[in-house]
Amino acid sequence: MMGALVLVAASVGVVDLTPAQLQEELRKASVPVVVNVWATWCRPCVEEFPEILEFARNNQGNVKVMLVSADFSSRRELVEKFLRERGVGFVTYLKQGSDEAFVEALSPQWSGALPATFVFAPGGKLVTWFERQITKAELEDAVKKAKIETRKGGKT
């Protein structure tokens, strides 16, 4: 299944992601994972995007960054254009399934508001999350916590 996802990503840049697929990605991760849920119509999401991208570029191989668009599937071309214009050079995702299932997959405490960023330790344990616009420095601190959690045996 993942091979198919990679092939799709290579041709269009955006891969559909269900809550079950998200949970599997988190479970199998061997490095901390940052999941940023955003949308093209969300002004704070667009404003924080350069910080998220800079963090992703500076931490390649040490942290997995998953950008998950909450735009409707009918807006896929707009999402692709947005990502292309910002030079995103890694696989990104388009949320599929119900909002409730996606919220549950990330954190039942999340209201669903955007932007939202979640930091997981390797193996999928949620370490911290933000339901607001964040900075690169905040992300760096959150990932440090995830790495400390890992050293404490925080894998799920």
Image (tube, helix red, strand yellow):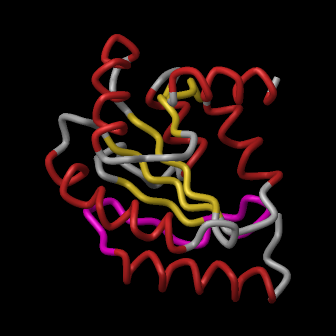
Pinpoint residue 36: horizontal percent, then vertical percent.
44, 53
- At x 29% / y 47%, what residue is drawn? 114
89 horizontally vs 144: left or right: left
The image quadrant that residue 78 belongs to is top left
Q: Which of these two is toward me, 35 or 11?
A: 11
Q: Which of these two is toward me, 123 or 5?
A: 5
125 horizontally vs 75: left or right: right
Q: Is residue 128 magenta?
A: yes
Looking at the image, residue 6 lies above or below residue 23: above
Dominant secondary structure (helix, strand or loop) of the stretch shown in magenta: loop
Pinpoint residue 101: horizontal percent, then vertical percent.
55, 31
- At x 57% / y 78%, what residue is drawn? 143
Please provide the residue range marked out in magenta: 120-135
Residue at the farthest left position: 43
For the C terminus, the quadrant is: bottom right
Looking at the image, residue 2 lies above or below residue 154: above
The image quadrant that residue 73 belongs to is top left
Pinpoint residue 155: horizontal percent, then vertical percent.
82, 70
For the N terminus, the quadrant is: top right
Pinpoint residue 95: horizontal percent, then vertical percent.
48, 29
- At x 36% / y 39%, what residue is drawn? 83
- At x 65% / y 40%, what residue is drawn? 22
8 horizontally vs 100: left or right: right
Residue at the farthest top position: 74
Q: Is residue 27 magenta?
A: no
